Image (cartoon, rainbow, N blue to C red):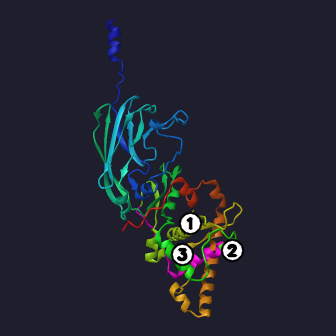
Amino acid sequence: MKSSLLLLLLAPSTVLADPSFSPWSFTEKDLFSSAIVSTATVDWNGEEEAAEDAKEEADDSDGGDVPIYGDENGWIGVELSELSEGAEVEVQMSVDGFMKPSKWKGTISRCDEDGMARVFPKAAWDFEALLKVRQQRPVTVTFKVSVDGSELPEQNETCVLKSINDCPFYVQLDEKGEEIEDFSWLFASYVNENHPVVDEILKEALKSGLVNSFTGYQSKDPDEVILQVFAIWNTLQRRGIKYSDISSTTPSKTVVSQSVRFIDDSIKATQANCVDGSVLMASILRKIGIEAYLVMVPGHCFLAFDTGKDDEADRYGLETTLLGNDNLKPVKEVPKLSETARKKEFEASYKTFTSAIECGTADLEKHADDFESEEDPNIQLISISEARKLGIMPIASGEAK
């Protein structure tokens, strides 16, 4: 009897660890204003719910993943560990000046084999404040968590709030960068077909006399579509838009990103890098109903557009970095030019335009297989229409001064 008691006393006891948590974000300690704003209404999973507290019987339950609760579309939350199923959890987070206290409260119905679960409270972001972030800055994210009525130690995480002009391309999920999370479709948020400057440019293009109206695909004539694109190209040249390769952004540990100007900033500065120029052209083409694409290849971006609505329509690339190759008179001075001078300018502009199409289309064809396979994160064909269907809306740049 004594020996049995002694063995019981000496046997290792099973001690349950106390619940704990750590801050969790898809982009780690970098918070991208552009991503938060442009995806505010995006529902990644559509009708199928991924959050445990919103699932129905018809929803697929992926038991191998860490279960999530709350806002399945959220960018930031907490990862809890050493939980027991049935635990009552409350999570609150806030960011001074950018997010009001945001809370989730509920029951953990399922956790993984290590007692882990992630909770994303529905973030009450101040979108107006985010739109005004033009330089990155440190922010403190405060997390408060309680489990079964017991408050865990409060945590304050210092994060970097990125400029509204910094667009994440993809996130490296491992140290070697072999696994990535693709966010390239976020570039479509800088395409803004509704910006007032687009109407101004279209009015100027009409004054040039190259086209009488912008009808998109109504004529069903590919040559007419190309002429409309040229009229816009010519007008931007007359605006004095020059190529500038300034595109640097402060490096991130895990996120590959690119600095992108808003279209009004490109117009005011009369300069644009490869992404800026493509975003500007895509915005105007979208306005007149022409399908536009942002084409991402290693270290570069250019534009593509369709000459018709049907699947058989030709798709052309357009190298927007060639915009600044001609020094043309402003649109308002075109009527003052002699017929010979006007013809000479249009011919010079059209020669550059055709070179831009030849160059862009060749690059488009070169990477056709890569676009199809989608294996290389640096090679992407971003359809603006598809991004809009996903829920990626234009970032309003008028309020950001």
Residue 68's image quarter? Answer: top left
Residue 295's image quarter? Answer: bottom right
Q: Choose the circle earlier in sequence order: 2 or 3.
A: 3
Is residue 66 something that shows in the picture?
no
- Kind of residue sitting beneath label 3: Leu
Label 2 element class: helix
**Mark number displayed over residue 286:** 1
Q: Which residue is mark 2?
A: 223
What are the residue bounds of the magenta stretch? 225-250
Q: Is residue 226 magenta?
A: yes
Q: Which residue is mark 3?
A: 202
Number of other residues with Cα within 10 Å of mark 1, as a class: few under 14, some 14 to 19, many 20 or more? many
Image position, residue 347 (x, y; %): 63, 85
- Kind of residue sitting beneath label 1: Arg
**Marks 1/3: CA distance?**
12 Å
Image position, residue 188 (x, y; %): 52, 61
Q: Choose the circle earlier in sequence order: 1 or 3.
A: 3
**Marks 2/1: CA distance?**
18 Å
Residue toward you, 297 or 327: 327
Q: Check whether the beta carbons of the residues at disc 2 and disc 1 lie within 8 A of each other.
A: no
Quarter containing the N terminus: top left
Residue toward you, 279 or 321: 279
Q: Check whether the beta carbons of the residues at disc 1 and disc 3 lie within 8 A of each other.
A: no
**Marks 2/3: CA distance?**
19 Å
Query: In the drawing, does residue 213 fall left or right of residue 36?
Result: right
